[in-house]
Amino acid sequence: MRKIFFIICFFSLIFVFALPALAATSTAQTNTPPLFKIPELQIKIPGMAKFSTVQCGEDGKCGVPWIGEYILGFYNYALSIVGILAALMLMAGGVLWLISAGDASRITQAKELIISSITGVIILASSYILLTQINPELTKFIPISVSYIERVDLGGDNNSPTVTLNTGTIAGALGVTCGQDSVSQIVNKAKGRATYSQEKRTQQTPEGFVYLDCSSFASFVLKCATGKSGGQRSADIFSEQRVWDQKLSSLQVGDMVGWAPQNNKDNSGHVIIYMGNGVFGDCHGGKGKEPGNCVSNSISLNKMIAYADSHSDGNLYLKRY
């Protein structure tokens, strides 16, 4: 009995050491967090009602405290059980002493039970102090730091008037050579040289770049690389409403994928051009309105599907010139 009690106390102390290893080492300031669904306890722990909310900071990281809180709740519950066992051992030793009737061996056994229970309680009670002396961080349940991905604002175009693409001027601003560079090369070279603006598209920026939107950029890339003329607006490009099967095997380099304004509740379309090798490129809004920041050259199939789910009617439409 005494050995069992010591084993319980020993593993309880080890458990305290192991807890903080599951926690990360960074914290987050309170901010408006993304939507986190607080999990419900499937195994109820007495004394633990529910988990705390997630706290997010301006650095794009959220502190998720749920694992630490669950382990802490379990430890507190286990500690109370060990305390009850210690009290029972203490009482058992007292009773054994009372009924020993002067038997020296029983009195010795009773003393050992009492001393063992008191020793175990002292070890448990002093575990926090021991850990604090070794390393105060061992007693802290720091939330796990999780970075969240901001929703991409694609911007897109609507039914504004068409513009005339001056291929030579745009090629000069983007540093590409039409008739020589491929679709992939043009998109890669354009990265860092175009700024998103639907109103000013094809005009020069004060920084020496060029203003483009999604459809004018895709049409320029197609024209510059292949000589084919594409539509100037997403409404024109996807007027046929040909739904893409979302399989890379059905695409050719230069194909345009996206949706028209009528496929979006916000009445804005978006065009992305296929570069080959499972990669797409575009010129988008949001942070793309910062100087030279609109071109992406590494959009994956999974991201394309996510775009369709969050920005259009769930479908992606295909146009091949």
Image: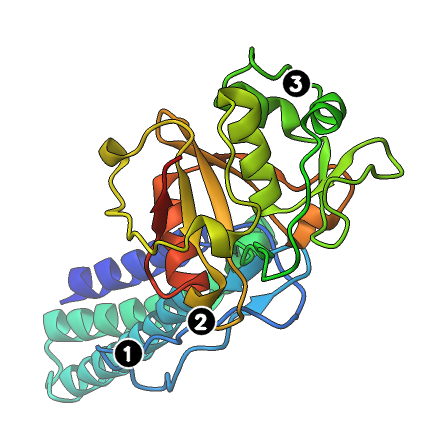
Q: Amino acid at mark 3?
A: Val
Q: Amino acid at mark 2?
A: Phe
Whether the residues at callouts 1 and 2 have beta carbons within 8 Å, the answer is no
Residue 247 spot, x, y in % from top left: 24, 40
Residue depicted at x 28% and y 53%: 243
For the residues labelled 3 and 1, the Cα–Cα distance comes to 58 Å
Q: Can residue 52 be seen at all in this image of the molecule? A: yes
Q: Nearer the viewer, mark 1 or mark 2?
A: 2
Q: Is residue 225 above or below residue 305?
A: above
Q: Is residue 241 above or below residue 84?
A: above
Q: Can residue 145 be seen at all in this image of the molecule? A: no
Residue 267 spot, x, y in % from top left: 53, 69
Q: In the figure, is residue 288 to the left or right of 36?
A: right
Q: Tell me the SS state at disc 2.
A: loop
Question: For mark 1, does the 10 Å Cα neighbourhood hold few (<14), some (14 to 19), or many (20 or more) residues?
Answer: few
Question: For mark 2, does the 10 Å Cα neighbourhood hold few (<14), some (14 to 19), or many (20 or more) residues?
Answer: few
Q: What residue is pinned by disc 2?
A: 36
Q: What residue is pinned by disc 3?
A: 176
- Identify the colour scheme used: rainbow
Q: What residue is pinned by disc 1?
A: 41
